Each structure stands twice: as C-alpha cells, then as structure tokens.
Amino acid sequence: MALLRNIVADAFELARSMRRVGDDNVSELPHPTPRSAVQAALSQDGYKVLLATRLRESARRWHIPFANHALRLATTVLYGIEIGSEIELGEGVNFAHTLGTVIGGTSKVGRRVKFMGNNTVGTNRDNGCPVIEDDVIVGCGARILGPVRIGKGAFIGANAVVLEDVPAGAVATGIPAKVRGRSDRHAELAKKHDQRED
C-alpha cells in the first residue's frame, strides 16, 4: 500500500512542479488534476526512474531475489542514471535530465528535490554522504560530496562543488561552492507548499 501511495504522490508532485516553472505568481501553488499527474508521469523519464527506484525499495523489503539489481541495471542502461541501493528518496523527487546523474552511498534526498542533470551526490574520501533537505534545486553538473547538509529550499548553482553545509534558502555557487546569497523566490514557493500541507 505504501508503494502505491508513493507512486501516486510522486506523479502529483511532478505535475505540480511542471506547472510551477515560469509561474511568477507564488501566492498559491497549483493544484494538479489526476489527468495532469498521469500526463506528467507518462512524459517524463525522471518519473520512470523514480518509479523503478520505488519498485527497487519494495523488492529489497520483500526480499525478491535479483529484482533490485535488474531494475538498477535497467535505469542505468535506459536512462544513464545510477542510484545506489541504500539511497532514501523523498516524495516528488524530480530528475529534469537523468543522463549522467549518480546518487550513491547512503545519501538522503528530501521531498521535491529537483536534479537538473549530470549531478553527483555521494561520498568524499569515504567519510560520509550528503543529506539534501526538502525543496532543493541542484543545478546542472553540480557535485555534492561528503557528510554535508543542504538546507531546505537551497539552490546549488550549475557546476558547483559542494564540500560544506549550505544553509536553508541559500544560493551556493563555485568550486568549491560558497554561499553567495539567498534564493528568496524558491524559498517562498517552499513556504507556500508547507502551508498547504498544514
């Protein structure tokens, strides 16, 4: 039952995030319909990767032999994305572009995190893995390495290499990444989403 709930929630979150792009009115978040959720799920490769990951989680929980490995291999070959066996993905994680993305080790990814593509999330010198909180956007080519925490609503710039914690709502860019300001628009969207859930 939890598997079905996660699959449906992922589709609705994807539809919501697709409608949010380019919307300057953040006074309220759009409410996706079942039809828009199905359309989003069918049209986005990232959803198919997320679906396969949910099935992998269930296969491990139910001790179905070879299913986890087969699904991992399928997503790697078909979509060019590598997601480790011990990864925790929150609801509505969005892979805008799957090619070249690697999430490894014991990384934890919160709800509604958006990966723009060609991202690496994992260990740095075998010393722990990142925790990415809710509503984070990870720009194209960004690397998040080691036991760092990316705060809620943060924005990681394209090609940034994050080796230190990033506070909630902050913008981090550069190599190594430094906090350069705040992502007010994205933080406002995250806040509105939280108010809707309450």
Image (cartoon, rainbow, N blue to C red):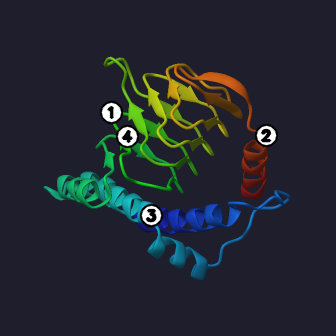
Q: Quadrant of the N terminus?
A: bottom left
Q: Residue at x 58, y 82 (%)?
A: 35
Q: Which residue is situated farthest in the bottom direction here?
A: 35
Residue occupied by mark 2: 184
Q: Earlier in the sequence, mark 3 or mark 4?
A: 3
Q: Residue at x 28, y 52 (%)?
A: 61
Residue occupied by mark 3: 47
User: Which amino acid type corresponds to the residue marked 3 in the rendered image?
Assistant: Tyr
Residue 103: assigned label: 4
Q: CA distance from mark 1 to mark 4?
A: 7 Å
Q: Earlier in the sequence, mark 1 or mark 2?
A: 1
Nearer the camera: disc 1 or disc 2 = 2
Q: Nearer the viewer, residue 183 or 54?
A: 183
Residue 7: assigned label: none
Tell me whether the residue at label 3 lies in contact with that at label 1, contact meaning CB atoms closer than 8 angstroms: no
Mark 3 nearby-residue class (10 Å; few <14, some 14–19, many ≥20): many
Residue 178, x across and y down, in percent? 62, 21
Q: Nearer the viewer, residue 71 or 182?
A: 182
Q: Nearer the viewer, residue 174 or 163?
A: 174
Q: CA distance from mark 2 to mark 4?
A: 27 Å
Mark 4 nearby-residue class (10 Å; few <14, some 14–19, many ≥20): many
User: Which amino acid type corresponds to the residue marked 2 in the rendered image?
Assistant: Asp
Q: CA distance from mark 3 to mark 1?
A: 22 Å
Residue 107, x across and y down, in percent? 41, 35
Residue occupied by mark 1: 105
User: Which amino acid type corresponds to the residue marked 4 in the rendered image?
Assistant: Ile
Nearer the camera: disc 1 or disc 4 = 4
